[in-house]
């Protein structure tokens, strides 16, 4: 199961209370205060891990509570600090506060960490308050409260190239041919229900990560179909490939619809380097030569391909490699 959006509740631990204590030992007639400080409450920490690829663990466990720090003790003994609670998430995860929408952190690299709920401060024991004027203080402080928050956790996949197209535009077939990915392929719409990542080799030394985004339909930016749920994964792509079926009843309208949906979702997406791939040329009479010139002129960089017939794929990979290098 691919889970890329969850809401969880976290609570850091309270700090331990300070202690009021005095030395009472045989042959020590003037024992002073020796109440120790409390321990700090545990933090709740979010950490990016390359070993995690989905938020499924957070889907099933939505409450994370850190422990409370120990109270201080006599003989100047400080309470033990509570351990942190670490939540491991995939790289590319964003964390926001549900109450105010504030972005707390964005974890991109393996090992990135952020404290999302801070543990309470430790209370002070009466030993802290002794002075030349106050030799027998009975003053102490309670430990501070730990933070409690509701968090929105969102995964945005990290990929170099994103495939954008209508259902059955040939995205899954293309990524299965170019990489070792094995998405579900069938002759009906929405066979791809989750984003699929694949590594594409470009020569002996170059490679890049390609992501197959589930098909977009008109109104996807507003939540129609499966669009908005997965459009977030396009945001971190460096290059986009618009895929238009050459056998579509109106390929030009399909291309304009894809551009319009990205514009309405996030205008910045149209600024990304992009390629128009006219797919399924094997279904057009005369193959690639049968694709009208007006379709080739729709986009600045256009390539005609057939994943089934393995035609035009080297041109596409070469074009994408050059764009990524630039």
Image (spheres, rainbow, N blue to C red):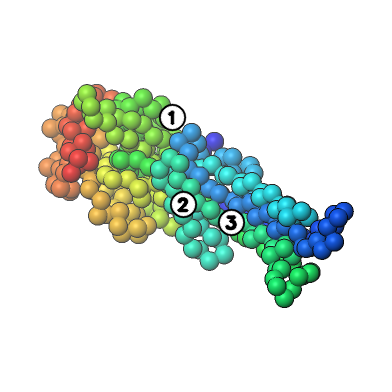
Residue 145, visible in the rendered structure:
no
Q: Nearer the viewer, residue 119 or 148?
A: 119
Q: Extreme front residue here?
A: 27
* For residue 30, above or below residue 214: below
- Circle 2 SS class: strand
Distance of label 2 from label 3 (alpha carbons): 15 Å
Q: Quadrant of the C terminus?
A: top left
Q: Nearer the viewer, residue 295 or 152?
A: 152
Q: Residues within 10 Å of mark 3 (few under 14, many from 20)?
A: many
Image coords of residue 58 (percent x, y)? 59, 44
Q: Which residue is mark 1?
A: 184
Query: Is residue 75 shown left or right of residue 103?
Result: right
Q: Extreme bottom residue here?
A: 133
**Do the numbered discs 2 and 3 sit on residues whose CB atoms are within 8 Å?**
no
Q: Residue at x 36, y 50 (%)?
A: 235
Q: Residue at x 41, y 26 (%)?
A: 182
Marking on residue 94: 2
Q: Decide which of tag 1 and tag 3 comes sooner along the chain.
A: 3
Residue 57, visible in the rendered structure:
yes
Q: Nearer the viewer, residue 77 or 71?
A: 77
């Amino acid at each position: 199961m691919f889970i890329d959006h969850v809401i969880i509740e976290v609570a850091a631990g309270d700090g331990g209370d300070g202690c009021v204590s005095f030395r009472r030992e045989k042959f020590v007639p003037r024992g002073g205060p020796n109440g120790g400080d409390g321990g700090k409450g545990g933090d709740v920490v979010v950490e990016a891990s390359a070993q995690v690829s989905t938020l499924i663990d957070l889907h099933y466990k939505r409450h994370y509570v850190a422990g409370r720090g120990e109270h201080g003790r006599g003989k100047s003994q400080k309470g033990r600090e509570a351990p942190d609670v670490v939540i491991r998430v995939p790289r590319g995860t964003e964390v926001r506060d549900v109450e105010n929408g504030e972005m707390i952190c964005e974890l991109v690299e393996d090992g990135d960490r952020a404290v999302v709920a801070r543990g309470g401060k430790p209370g002070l024991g009466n030993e802290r308050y002794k002075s030349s004027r106050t030799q027998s203080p009975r003053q102490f402080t309670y430990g501070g409260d730990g933070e409690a928050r509701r968090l929105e956790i969102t995964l945005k996949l990290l990929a170099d190239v994103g495939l954008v197209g209508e259902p059955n535009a040939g995205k899954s077939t293309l990524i299965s041919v170019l990489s070792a990915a094995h998405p579900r392929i069938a002759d009906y719409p929405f066979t791809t229900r989750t984003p699929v990542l694949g590594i594409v080799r470009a020569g002996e030394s170059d490679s890049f990560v390609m992501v197959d985004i589930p098909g977009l339909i008109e109104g996807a930016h507003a939540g129609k179909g499966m669009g908005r749920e997965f459009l977030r994964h396009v945001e971190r792509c460096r290059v986009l490939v618009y895929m238009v079926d050459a056998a579509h009843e109106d390929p030009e309208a399909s291309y304009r619809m894809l551009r319009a949906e990205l514009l309405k979702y996030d205008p910045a997406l149209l600024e990304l380097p992009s390629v128009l791939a006219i797919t399924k040329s094997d279904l057009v009479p005369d193959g690639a030569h049968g694709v009208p010139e007006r379709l080739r002129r729709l986009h600045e960089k256009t390539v005609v391909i057939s994943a089934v017939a393995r035609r035009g794929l080297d041109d596409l990979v070469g074009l994408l490699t050059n764009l990524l290098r630039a």
